[in-house]
Image (cartoon, grey):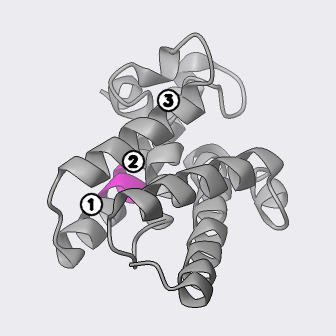
Amino acid sequence: MALVIATVGGAGWAPVAPGTVASALTALLLWLVPFSRAGLVLFFVAVTLIGTWAAEHAERALGGKDPGAIVIDEVAGMTLSVLALPLTLPVLAVAFALFRVFDIVKPFPAGKAQALRGGAGVMVDDLIAGLYALAVVVVLRALVGWP
């Protein structure tokens, strides 16, 4: 069960860019499912908590630190990147692009957070990337004024 959750139903086995695939699937889910704000927060908390557990167990099963097939962290990070925003296509597209950049570049303290052990080490850097993406989208929306 942990492997199914950690790989987001197998999306983590995508042959190219599994993290990007999982992030894109999350953006699509967020656009298609009519989440209320409370529902979105509940979804985020559940993915983060269950994902941390699943990542911990999947890391042991797969061997190695944060194997590429574990992509539940991208689901949590992508969700955080839009948590306080309207789930419109422009918001989702910009948040997706920013989240991917921050997840790949890992600006401080995201890179350091990867040193944490187990499921927390898998999840925290993506949550930081999601928080950075959220902050940039909030500022962009304030400056440009898009809905």
Q: Residue at x 82, y 50 (%)?
A: 105
How much space separates mark 1 and mark 2, taking CA atoms? Answer: 13 Å
Q: Residue furthest top?
A: 15
Between disc 1 and disc 2, whose residue precedes?
A: 2
Q: Residue at x 55, y 81 (%)?
A: 138
The residue under label 2 is which amino acid type? Answer: Ala
Q: Residue at x 65, y 26 (%)?
A: 67
The residue under label 3 is which amino acid type? Answer: Val
Q: Which mark is residue 21?
A: 3
Between disc 2 and disc 3, whose residue precedes?
A: 3
How much space separates mark 2 and mark 3, taking CA atoms? Answer: 10 Å
Mark 1 highlights which residue?
Answer: 43
Mark 1: few, some, or many residues within 10 Å (few <14, many ≥20)?
Answer: some
Q: Quadrant of residue 120?
A: bottom right
Instruction: Name above or below for residue 27 compared with residue 14.
Output: below
The residue under label 1 is which amino acid type? Answer: Phe
Q: Nearer the viewer, residue 143 or 16?
A: 143
Query: Foreground mark, 1 or 2?
Result: 2
Q: Report the number of numbered marks.
A: 3
